[in-house]
Amino acid sequence: MKRILLMFLRNLLFCPYWFYQLCVYGRENDRHTEEERFALLKKMVIKANKSGRVTIEATGLENLPQKDGFIMFPNHQGLYDALAFIESSSHPFSVVVKKEVRNIPFLKQVFSVMRVKAIDREDIKKAMKVILDVAKEVGEGRNYIIFAEGTRSKKGNQVQNFKGGTFKSAIKAKCPIVPAAIIDAFKPFDTNSIKPVTVQIHYLPPLYYEDYKEMKSTEIAALVKDRIESAICENMPVDDI
């Protein structure tokens, strides 16, 4: 929480204007393009990260498909995760979030700009609608992030089991699946420190529909998890091992 306060204080003069811009860009009838909305968020996040003493190191950007209409499946470490992707990704994207975080102040405005989908895991009918909506939008060229663990890991860089059901949108859209390994993304917001921290993101080679069309969703989940765990093990900072 100290780092969030640091980011806020160092950008105190900008925060009212940023909030106003988020409200404007987040309106349902806003006419800015997705690229313009993403550029706004990237500008804010880069400045917030710098003021909060957070460095993003990204590798594998060449693995992102050139054509939009893909879903990234990273491991999940906390609320900071999406900010790391916003700074590093060369493609605009949205996120599927659990309904519990949909109305957190400030995040609510950011989510509106991103046009996120909020999923209610207790309501199967509503959850299925989100899956179908995401599949439709991906088929039309939007990109998404889905956290296949369902909830953040509470054990640092240790990865939890990936849920097969989270891959249904990708299967229905027949789109590329991009595994992404994040390392130390829990440190900026989930540790009570303002020491400089480096968050790593490794965009891994994608799985195309031809690669997974014969696989069950649980098999896809296990494969993506294994690739992410391998990348984390290969790139874990020495001090964290």
Image (cartoon, rainbow, N blue to C red):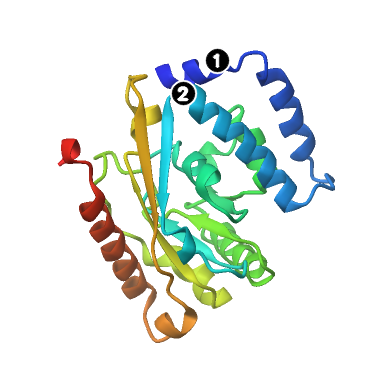
Question: Could one spot residue 119 in this view of the protein?
Answer: no
Q: Mark 1 points at which residue?
A: 10
Above or below, comparing residue 112 to residue 232 in the picture: above
| Quadrant housing residue 21 | top right
Q: Name the residue under label 2.
A: 52
Quadrant of image for the C terminus: top left
Above or below, comparing residue 206 to residue 79 in the picture: below
Question: Could one spot residue 43 in this view of the protein?
Answer: yes
Disc 1 to disc 2: CB gap under 8 Å: yes
Residue 85 is situated, as x and y percent measured from the top left of the image, at: 50, 47
Q: In this view, does 158 lie to the left or right of 221?
A: left
Residue 124 is situated, as x and y percent measured from the top left of the image, at: 51, 60
Seen at 67% across and 19% down, the residue is 14
Residue type at numbered disc 1: Arg
Nearest the viewer among 105 and 130 is: 105
Quadrant of image for the N terminus: top left
Assess disc 2: are there few (<14), some (14-19) or many (≥20) residues with their C-alpha within 10 Å of its C-alpha.
many
Residue type at numbered disc 2: Gly
Say which element carries label 2.
loop
Seen at 48% across and 16% down, the residue is 6
Seen at 44% across and 42% down, the residue is 81
Nearest the viewer among 88 and 22 is: 88
Say which element carries label 1.
helix
| Quadrant housing residue 218 | bottom left
Residue 34 is situated, as x and y percent measured from the top left of the image, at: 72, 52
Q: In this view, does 241 lie to the left or right of 19?
A: left
Assess disc 1: are there few (<14), some (14-19) or many (≥20) residues with their C-alpha within 10 Å of its C-alpha.
some
Residue 214 is situated, as x and y percent measured from the top left of the image, at: 39, 87
Earlier residue among tags 1 and 2: 1
